[in-house]
Image (cartoon, rainbow, N blue to C red):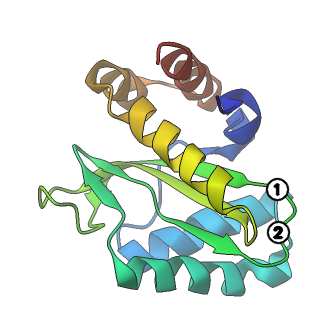
Amino acid sequence: MINFRHLISPECIILQLDKTEHEEVVLEMIGHLAEIGKIASKDCYRYSQAVMERESQTGTGLGAGIAIPHARVPGLKEEVAVYGRSEEGVDFESPDQGLAHHVCLLLVPEDGASNHLKILRELAKVFSQADLRKKIRSAQSAEEISELLCIGAADL
């Protein structure tokens, strides 16, 4: 099981994404990871390109208002993630044609394929809980969202 408290701590949560365009949201989220010291600023462009390259293969919108853009990147030491909430929604090419209101961007080390898939699977399960998504949308703080994600993961 993923340690959600470590992976998506309150500092890794953006209460309201400023951007609404797909690529701009990816840049905003990766920029946030750099701002909080999870990745080096010099790597932002390279990491965003890796995510967008992955996005060009297949959209990472899962439907039900969820998107999990992700990529394996060289030089990264451990998995990092950032969650962003969007009131307006962002088009991540979901199968249901809906906009994503819950965006969780994941970067994993290039050699971490098995862990990458495990984390994606658990994130998808956590965000598939409709009642949890509703609570997250009305949460007032990053701490509250982080706690809800931990509770949602424990309920799996």
Work out whether 150 lies above or below 69: above
The reply to whether residue 65 is visible in this rendering is yes
Q: For this view, does 42 lie left or right of residue 79?
A: right
The reply to whether residue 83 is visible in this rendering is no
Q: For this view, does 137 lie left or right of residue 4?
A: left
Q: Mark 1 touching mark 2, by CB under 8 A?
A: yes
Q: Which mark is residue 28?
A: none
**Quarter of the rendering containing residue 19:** bottom left
What residue do we see at 71% from left, 40% from top? 7
Residue type at mark 2: give it: Leu
What residue do we see at 34% from left, 29% from top? 133
Nearer the observer, 115 or 101? 115
Q: Residue furthest front?
A: 114
Work out whether 17 lies above or below 129: below
Residue on which the image places disc 1: 78
Q: Position of residue 143 (x, y in %)?
A: 65, 25
Look at the image and tell me in which quarter the N terminus lies: top right
Work out whether 137 lies above or below 20: above
Residue type at mark 1: give it: Glu
What residue do we see at 46% from left, 18% from top? 156
Q: Which mark is residue 76?
A: 2
Q: For this view, does 31 lie left or right of residue 129?
A: right
Q: Position of residue 129 (x, y in %)?
A: 32, 25
**Badge 2: residue crowd in 10 Å (few <14, some 14–19, many ≥20):** some
**Quarter of the rendering containing residue 98:** bottom left
Q: Position of residue 62 (x, y in %)?
A: 29, 53
**Quarter of the rendering containing residue 137:** top left
Q: Residue furthest left?
A: 96
**Badge 1: residue crowd in 10 Å (few <14, some 14–19, many ≥20):** few
Nearer the observer, 142 or 123? 123
- SS class, disc 2: loop
- SS class, disc 1: loop
